Image (cartoon, rainbow, N blue to C red):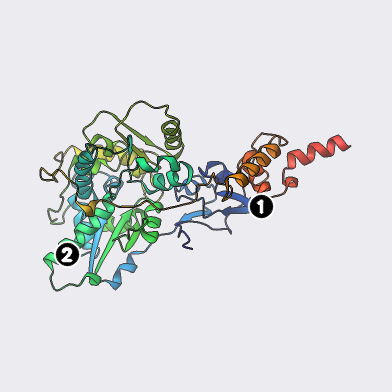
Amino acid sequence: MHLYDHSVLLDASKCTGCTTCLKHCPTEAIRIKDGHAIINEKRCIDCGECIRNCPHKAKKAVFGKLEDMKRFKYKIALPAPTLYGQFDNLDDVDYVLDGLLRIGFDDVFEVSKAAELVSAYTRLYLKTDGIKKPVISSACPVAIRLISLRFPSLSENILHMLPPMEVAARLARERALKNHPELKSEDIGVCFISPCPAKVSYVKNGFADYKSQVDVVVSISDIYFLLISEMKQENDIKSLCESGIIGIGWASSGGESTAIFNEDYLAADGIENIIRVLDQIENGNIPQLEFIELNACPGGCVGGVMAMENPFVAKARLQSLRRYLPVSQNFIDEENYIPDNYLFNNLPEYQPISRLADSMAQSMRMMADIQQIKNTLPGIDCGACGAPNCRAFAEDIVKNKASIDGCIIKAGKEKRNDG
């Protein structure tokens, strides 16, 4: 059985068991055992909420290093549009792109360029007969894994379009092979510069039957200081930018949605907000919409835990930068179909976290037992038992992962009554 290779890990030596991460995990993947946190890999969606909220820096993102690219003869950088929002007083994207060449890359292919192509084909996708609406964006890997684990009934709504990172990787490889016929495919290395640990997991695990064309994912925070030293105003920079307002807009929440040129959309960011939206879609308590954009990070990709800058500052910088750009530099021909290499066929299969057992009868018995135990608990969701709430603690007891004695509130009350 294939185990999901995660990119959010725990440093137990720094963990005090304070329960902060416990309270913020959207899939209840964390428990406190023996004085420190434990992450359930089957439930973790690599959203980075535990990294964002841990006061002791005990959670960390695991990603590649720039040195990992040395094994390739020809190195291509894929900068996420979020990267441009990390630099103060940036008025020209070319300073960043040229800086990437100066730190050792042979070519740069903007993910924002691919985002403009994905936006164009999404507009075409929404006109296709028979698709289930509202269509939910597939760009955020956290949202897709969250749907698979907590909202499997909404899987049919997911847009079957590859994310811009993957489209950029493919187009970059094709361009390299065309411009350098002496290269072989294995000579080319593609490096995505990411604000998000979930993208690292996406690349490591693949996506159902699709294998990522990205070789290495590095963090924006690692690249930032290397670029700062090379991005000098006096440098004679090359004109490399091939994207516009639409592509760079993808870095912030709402950027993907506005690019479909349709007012019947919703854009939500922040893990709690997207869970609320998915609940409403599943329950049918949402207006008639064409498209839904979901970003797990606050503010969109600018809020990723592998970025450097405050997301609101980065968003404001990107808004300023966009003033100097055309609307878009990438267009599709008047086509009536979407090329196969922009689409994926299957979604990954995960066991929904609401499924307690393989059989319906056993699941129902366990649900009844969980409810019965929950009714005996204090109901204050204090987390002292090591579970995020009383219901989760009751489930742990039924699954033989915890003992009722773990509830110190209940034990203390019973002791006082006995006395």
Q: Secondary structure at mark 2?
A: helix
- Residue 176 image label: 2
Residue occupying the point 22% across, 58% down:
170
Q: Nearer the viewer, mark 1 or mark 2?
A: 1
In this view, the residue farthest toward the right is 419
Residue occupying the point 23% across, 31% down:
262
Q: Is residue 30 left or right of residue 341?
A: right
Residue 340 on image: x %, y %? 22, 53
Q: Viewer-proximal residue, 305 or 23?
A: 23
Q: Secondary structure at mark 1?
A: loop
Label 1, label 2: how many angstroms apart (C-alpha)? 53 Å
Q: Viewer-proximal residue, 123 or 60?
A: 123
Q: Is residue 310 visible?
A: no
Q: Earlier in the sequence, mark 1 or mark 2?
A: 2
Residue 5 on image: x %, y %? 45, 60
Q: Viewer-proximal residue, 346 or 222?
A: 346
Q: Amino acid at mark 2?
A: Ala
Image quadrant in which the C terminus is located: top right
Verify CB contact (< 8 Å) between mark 1 and mark 2.
Answer: no
The residue singled out by tag 1 in the image is 401
Residue occupying the point 20% across, 59% down:
172
